[in-house]
Amino acid sequence: MPSFREIRDWSPGYLNVAPQHVDIMAECQACGEQREFDRRSVPAAMRQQLIKEIEPHLKCATCGAKAGKLRFGHYVGEE
Ligand SMILES: [Zn+2]
């Protein structure tokens, strides 16, 4: 399984300015679940919004909590 390497102290601010080569990982702060975040899964009306405005709408598929946190970085394979 590839691991996620977060870019420290960096956020694009708005989701739609996150470069395509940057991977996004959604983390549930309630249960710790981590999964790759597909930016196309965000409704068109929300893509213009700030990351911090989108995060409260992220519902965890595992525990159902709305405690999502988006992290930006890169998935790196095992070497
Ligand atoms: Zn959860």
Image (cartoon, helix red, strand yellow):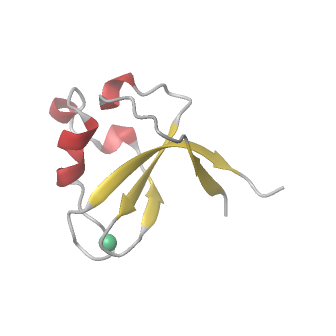
* Residue 1 falls in image quadrant: bottom right
* Residue 29 falls in image quadrant: bottom left
Relative to 49, say whether 57 is above or below: below
Q: How many numbered marks have been drawn onto this rendered protein structure? A: 0
At a point 18% along the width and 34% down the height, the residue shown is 46
At a point 22% along the width and 72% down the height, the residue shown is 64
At a point 37% along the width and 48% down the height, the residue shown is 70
> Foreground: 30 or 48?
30
Instruction: Please state if 22 lies on the left or on the right of 55 as rendered.
Output: right
* Residue 61 falls in image quadrant: bottom left
Determine the quadrant in which ligand 1 lies. Answer: bottom left
| Picture coordinates of residue 6, whole percent (x, y) | 55, 46
> Foreground: 66 or 13?
13
> Foreground: 5 or 26?
5
At a point 37% along the width and 22% down the height, the residue shown is 17
| Picture coordinates of residue 68, whole percent (x, y) | 29, 58
The single residue placed furthest to the front in the displayed view is 9
Q: Quadrant of the C terminus?
A: bottom right
Instruction: Please state if 1 lies on the left or on the right of 39 as rendered.
Output: right
Relative to 64, say whether 3 is above or below: above
| Picture coordinates of residue 43, whole percent (x, y) | 21, 38
Instruction: Please state if 3 lies on the left or on the right of 51 as rendered.
Output: right
